[in-house]
Image: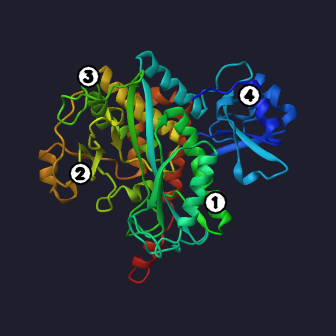
């Protein structure tokens, strides 16, 4: 893909009659932030960046050091279809955040990902990912009334959200984001639109855009879209299965034609790294209290730390190899959910894989049985452990992890852990509807 230059951007702004350029960035928790500038400010923004007050951005800066610089990445320039008409257009660019002294800001999640990519690049690798994001459509933001009672791959008349998915895909394509396919998911009113794999920095930007587009198109249709991991009790939650591979140049470093599963030794070590460190990174890939309502046995969510080829109850699945499709050889990490911060989630997955390669971790044998049906004794005998049961356990494992601390950097690490502990303390003090219904009549 050809990188855009400053002159390319200025030309596009004139050509498309752009009146506002939105400068986007992401806070530590993964929420999209931004502000708009006019074309008169654009050339200066591309050369020197735009100053803003970072003191109110989650995890960014204290009041006494609030000045930040947002430097737009020209390659991410795109016209926003839903904000553009015949007479004018609105565009966006993702930004890297800098301190006034010119140093990259260590609290910027995009910088965290770039720093970890630099480590992979030193070893000659590029990191490609293809996430599968699931979400729900509801009547509005105050209720969980579904739009349909459809199931997996259902079509009309059950799948009344086909028009929403269609308009969402058209919008993503207009933004230059390639969509692989879309379909109704297992639960009522649950859907999935899969993005075609790309380099990980592009994909993290695409995930942020995707989440906004899904919500915006839903709003235009008078409904609400949510990436909440488990909005409804008793049915499947929403995941973000992440297909990933390392390349060396144009060659897929994960492929080996002589291996039973067509995995190279490097791919096996990478996978072993993810399995070994999975409990430590779960607070990052499943970062909300609600995330752990999804990570329970029985709803296709991966709870058990093992790998397999066909077994979808495993944490890591190896998609089947198709002859002539060597570049498609990959692993699928299944525990993340779509409400995570993609820059941080992709960073910790890469860090685990690189640790496995550096230390030559050995991959255990795959799990062949459906783990949900195994007894505790059988799982123990097979050496199969579980992901953390709740956010508190996940926080404690991350807090004790040197890998997570090094990956995120001291600033993001400290803020993230502190914020998640606050979330847990708020949550545990709540009186839930379950408690009222169960205990009020009998106590």
Q: Which quarter shows the C terminus?
A: bottom left
Q: CA distance from mark 1 to mark 2?
A: 35 Å
Residue at 17 percent of width and 35 percent of height:
260
Whole-percent x and y of residue 270?
A: 31, 30
Q: Which quarter shows the N terminus?
A: top right
Q: Are marks 4 and 2 in contact (CB under 8 Å)?
A: no
Mark 1 residue element? helix
Disc on res. 360 = 3
Whole-percent x and y of residue 382?
A: 14, 44
Disc on res. 311 = 2
Disc on res. 217 = 1
Q: Which of pointers 4 and 3 indicates the residue nearer the eye?
A: 4
Quadrant housing residue 150: bottom left
Q: Which of pointers 4 and 2 indicates the residue nearer the eye?
A: 4
Q: CA distance from mark 1 to mark 4?
A: 29 Å
Whole-percent x and y of residue 162?
A: 53, 66
Q: Are marks 1 and 2 in contact (CB under 8 Å)?
A: no
State whether residue 190 is above or below residue 272: below
Q: Which of pointers 1 and 4 indicates the residue nearer the eye?
A: 4
Q: Which of pointers 2 and 3 indicates the residue nearer the eye?
A: 2
């Amino acid at each position: 893909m050809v990188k855009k230059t400053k002159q390319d951007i200025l030309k596009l702004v004139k050509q498309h009659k752009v009146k506002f350029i939105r400068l986007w960035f992401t806070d530590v928790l993964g929420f999209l932030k931004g502000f708009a500038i006019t074309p008169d400010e654009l050339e200066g923004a591309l050369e020197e960046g735009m100053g803003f007050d970072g003191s109110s951005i989650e995890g960014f800066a204290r009041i006494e050091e609030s000045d930040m610089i947002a430097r737009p990445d020209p390659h991410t320039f795109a016209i926003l279809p839903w904000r553009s008409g015949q007479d004018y257009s609105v565009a966006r660019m993702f930004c890297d955040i800098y301190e006034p002294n010119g140093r990259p800001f260590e609290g910027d999640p995009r910088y965290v990902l770039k720093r970890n990519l630099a480590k992979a690049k030193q070893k000659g690798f590029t990191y490609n990912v293809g996430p599968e994001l699931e979400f729900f459509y509801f009547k509005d933001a105050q209720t969980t009334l579904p739009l349909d009672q459809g199931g997996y791959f259902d079509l009309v008349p059950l799948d009344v959200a086909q028009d929403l998915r269609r308009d969402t895909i058209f919008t993503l394509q207009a933004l230059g984001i390639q969509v692989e396919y879309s379909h109704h998911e297992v639960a009522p009113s649950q859907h999935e639109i899969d993005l075609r794999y790309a380099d990980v920095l592009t994909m993290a930007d695409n995930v942020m855009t995707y989440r906004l587009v899904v919500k915006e198109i839903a709003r235009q249709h008078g409904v609400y879209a949510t990436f909440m991991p488990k909005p409804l009790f008793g049915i499947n939650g929403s995941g973000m299965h992440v297909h990933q591979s390392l390349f060396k140049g144009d060659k897929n470093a994960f492929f080996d034609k002589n291996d039973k599963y067509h995995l190279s030794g490097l791919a096996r070590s990478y996978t072993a790294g993810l399995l070994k460190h999975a409990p430590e990174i779960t607070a990052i890939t499943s970062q909300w209290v609600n995330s752990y309502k999804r990570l329970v046995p029985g709803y296709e969510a991966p709870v058990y730390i093992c790998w397999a080829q066909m077994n979808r109850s495993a944490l890591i699945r190896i998609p089947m190899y198709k002859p002539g499709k060597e570049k498609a050889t990959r692993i699928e990490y299944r525990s993340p959910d779509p409400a995570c911060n993609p820059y941080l989630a992709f960073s910790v997955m890469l860090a685990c894989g690189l640790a496995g390669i550096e230390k030559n971790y050995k991959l255990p044998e795959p799990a062949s049985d459906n783990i949900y049906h195994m007894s505790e004794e059988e799982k123990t005998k097979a050496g199969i452990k579980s992901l953390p049961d709740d956010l508190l356990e996940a926080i404690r494992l991350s807090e004790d992890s040197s890998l997570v601390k090094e990956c995120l950097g001291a600033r993001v690490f400290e803020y993230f852990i502190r914020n998640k502990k606050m979330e847990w303390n708020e949550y545990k003090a709540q009186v839930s509807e379950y408690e009222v219904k169960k205990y009020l009549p009998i106590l």
